[in-house]
Image (cartoon, rainbow, N blue to C red):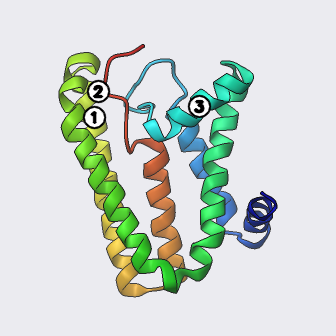
Amino acid sequence: MRNIIRTFVNGINNNAYGIPSSLVIAFFSYLTISSNVPKPISPFSVTVVFPMFIAIAIVGKTFLSSLLTSFFCSSLYIIIFNTVFKKWSKFAQVFSYGYFLIILCSIYYYIKAFDFGMKYQGSTHTYTVTTINMILISIVTYLNWRSLIVRTPFMLKFSGTVFFLWFFWISFPWLGELI
């Protein structure tokens, strides 16, 4: 636990790029849960909703639970940013496999959940979220491919930041029935 806290603090102190990026991640993770119902701009991404349930169990359904969820997502980004991206040359190929696996899981999720989205969320919502998701998947794939060719630390950090933005905002949106 002490090492995780040290990694988080070092990530904030040592990386000028990490702080603005983590704030963007926190904003978009908050955006995904900002409304009470799924909307194209706040699609209730499963990757943010599960930590939100934990925060609600701890502090109740308040603004604080949304802040705790955003803090969790940005903290996770900073920890990964500080450990993995520091050794970018060793992890570039492994990170690419991680991108590929999560993107495949997202596409599989869409194939399974698309009919539920059309039934419960409506065609406008489902098509809008799918379009935004496919655009971001294309951008993440291109940046990942580019980071493998260019092999600079900035390119890997930038592609990782865009990946986490997609992951915490719209990667696995809730397309089913509301509770």
Provide the secondary structure element on which disc 2 rests. Answer: helix
Q: CA distance from mark 1 to mark 3?
A: 24 Å
Residue 63: image location, x then y, percent = 69, 24
Label disc, if present, on residue 125 of the rendered structure = 2
The residue that disc 3 covers is: 52
The answer to whether the residue labelled 2 contacts the one labelled 1, judged by CB atoms less than 8 Å apart, is yes
Q: What mark, if any, has residue 128 been given in the picture?
A: 1
Q: Position of residue 135 (x, y in %)?
A: 29, 52
Quarter of the N terminus within the rendering: bottom right
Q: Nearer the viewer, residue 125 or 111?
A: 111
Q: Nearer the viewer, mark 1 or mark 3?
A: 3
- The three-letter code of the residue at mark 2 reads His
Q: Amino acid at mark 3?
A: Met
Q: Mark 2 touching mark 3, by CB under 8 A?
A: no
| Residue 49 shows in this picture | yes
Residue at the image point whose x is 39% and y is 65% from the top:
98
